[in-house]
Image (cartoon, rainbow, N blue to C red):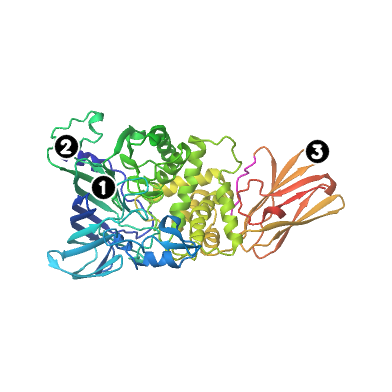
Amino acid sequence: MKKTLLITLISFIGFAQNNPNPGYWQQHVDYKMDVKMDVKNYQYTGTQELVYTNNSADTLRKVYYHLYPNAFQPGSAMDIRLQTISDPDKRMVRKFKVAEKEVTESRIKALKSDEIGYLKISNFKQNGKSATTRVVGTVLEVTLAEAILPKSKSNFSLTFDGQVPLQVRRSGRNSEEDVALSMTQWYPKMAEYDFEGWHADPYIGREFHGVWGDFDVKLTIDKDYTVGGTGYLQNKNEIGHGYQDKGIEVKYPRKTKELTWHFVAPNVHDFTWAADNDYIHDILIGENNVELHFLYKNKTENLENWKKMQPKTAELLAFFNKNVGPYPYKQYSVIQGGDGGMEYGMCTLITGNRSYGSLVGVTAHEFAHSWFQFVLASNESKHEWMDEGFTSFISDLAMDVVMPPKEKEDNVFESAYRNYTYLANSGKEQPLSTHADRYDYNMGYSIGAYSKGEVFLAQLGYLIGSDNLMKTLKRYYYDYKLTHPTPNDIKRSAERVSGANLDWYLVDWTQTTNTIDYAIQGLEENNGKTTLTLERKGRMPMPIDLLVVYEDGSKETFYIPNTLMRFEKENPYLDIKRTVLNGWDWAYPTYSVYIPKTKSSIKAIVIDPSGLMADVKRDDNVYEKK
């Protein structure tokens, strides 16, 4: 067992924190937990010992823990949010009729005392001394017995009692697919403290931010249950449950009713597990000897799709390794559980009663989160578009390779562009700088985080070129892996790779609702030459790729730089002659292009033939000779 742990830790040599920002620091935690789960009443008890390393220059007199299960109680902030938002998450509400009128009700509101979630803390001590604690909803506030000085450590210990709620959102028991335990956000989790201060956000069902650390977890549970999740199992030879099929001899068969599963997870910022007494457990070795684990219900309708999906997961691993950077762990688990799909450290929980294509698709998205969130650990709550959008971008590229559609679209990201355009024209858009919890509409959050975030990268390729974009992803990964990157960091990676100035792009796209809207205003002929007038209707300036098609079948393009970029993009259409024009300054609402041919010789003109510029009204981007 000591040898296994040593190998696990050695695998991280050469993959240490590598953030290039001057003065960068991040806190560190070491968790040691011993937990016992009662599968009959869905209650669990545990002890937690935690070593907190304060790498900041600040003296800390208080610390905060997340108690996420407390959200699943009637009257909680999550419950009230469900009751007051106009478009609640459909998974979290139930509908019924009262006097012929359809009523929508929060599922949390209807939970009984033995169905709610809770996490109760007792016996909290700091360095052996009692500290003052106060629970406020889903947050534990701790007034320390002694201040934690800069560059010093402190030891915390506590006892916790929890109850697993009925499956409502992410964490829970007895899901619609009959998975017994989906144990996500289940333990007292230290809140993050960074250069912005504490991030002790209440939990209302959105995103997370965690402290990097090492986990050592012992979980005792009924021997008939198979467990999968974060970390490396240290005692496979005592457990069985699928491991004996891989040549591991189970040396200590137990006559006891329970087994203790011992997991170690180095350098992660969360710990998740799931368990069921009817799981099939398959293992496939992927690129770089990464163990890919698959745990799913033993149901006939599932078996074929889950078996077919496994080699595709190995293909996805290779794709992400090649196009972003090498996956730094030696294990990843795809587990049937939860209520949709959600990423966690070294694993994902997904619903499993899906078609084959849907199963591969959700796995692609959640697996991609291992790069964009669980290695590049941006603050999901404040910059939700960075993890969801970047994940959507790379998983769409991956699916186009491992599961190519019968009819390929010219723009792989067209669906994201359509969604964003709908939101931008709806009047309900809020800036991407909006905290994930505080969007007015779930629709605005979802399209903003997933689609507009995806378009941020796809459109960045339009700005600096597709080759530079893919180089940017690799540079971003290399520079910021295993740290907490911010929006400025992806911008700086792109600037370092391309040489372009991109601050205007980051500000307009993520901190405002400024839109891109260009139009062909008109064509005029004078002395055998044509003057094309373009108009910028939207607030957000862009460089322009302009395609001109002539009656004789020939084509040429014109490139109009955006002066804010101080940059000239490589010609994306190598087989077509290109003319680079003077830049278009954002202060000028119109721009004239002089075409040395008659108007009658021009068949068509197109602004942005690639479709990668997110113009919100494309109808006026095309001129066609009538």
Q: Which of marks 2 and 1 is in front?
A: 2
Distance, label 3 to label 2, CA atoms, is 77 Å
Q: Position of residue 527 (x, y in %)?
A: 87, 52
| Residue 513 visible here | yes
Of the image marks 2 and 1, the number of the one nearer the N terminus: 2
Of the image marks 1 and 3, the number of the one nearer the N terminus: 1
Q: In this view, does 245 lie to the left or right of 195?
A: left
Q: Position of residue 279 (x, y in %)?
A: 30, 39
Task: Please identify the dominant SS of the magenta region.
Answer: loop
Residue placed under numbered mark 1 in the picture: 266
Residue placed under numbered mark 2 in the picture: 238
Q: Which of marks 3 and 2 is in front?
A: 2
Q: Which residue is drawn at 47% across and 50% down?
A: 390
Say which mark, if any, is on residue 552: 3
Q: How crowded is mark 3: few (under 14 residues within 10 Å), some or many (20 or more)?
A: few
- Amino acid at dot 3: Asp
Q: Residue at x 59, y 60 (%)?
A: 424
Distance, label 2 to label 1, CA atoms, is 22 Å
Q: Where is residue 531 in the image (x, y as percent from the top left)?
A: 79, 54
Magenta residues, start to end: 565-573
Against 229, residue 52 (above or below) is below
Q: Is residue 100 left or right of residue 426?
A: left
Against 320, residue 561 (above or below) is below
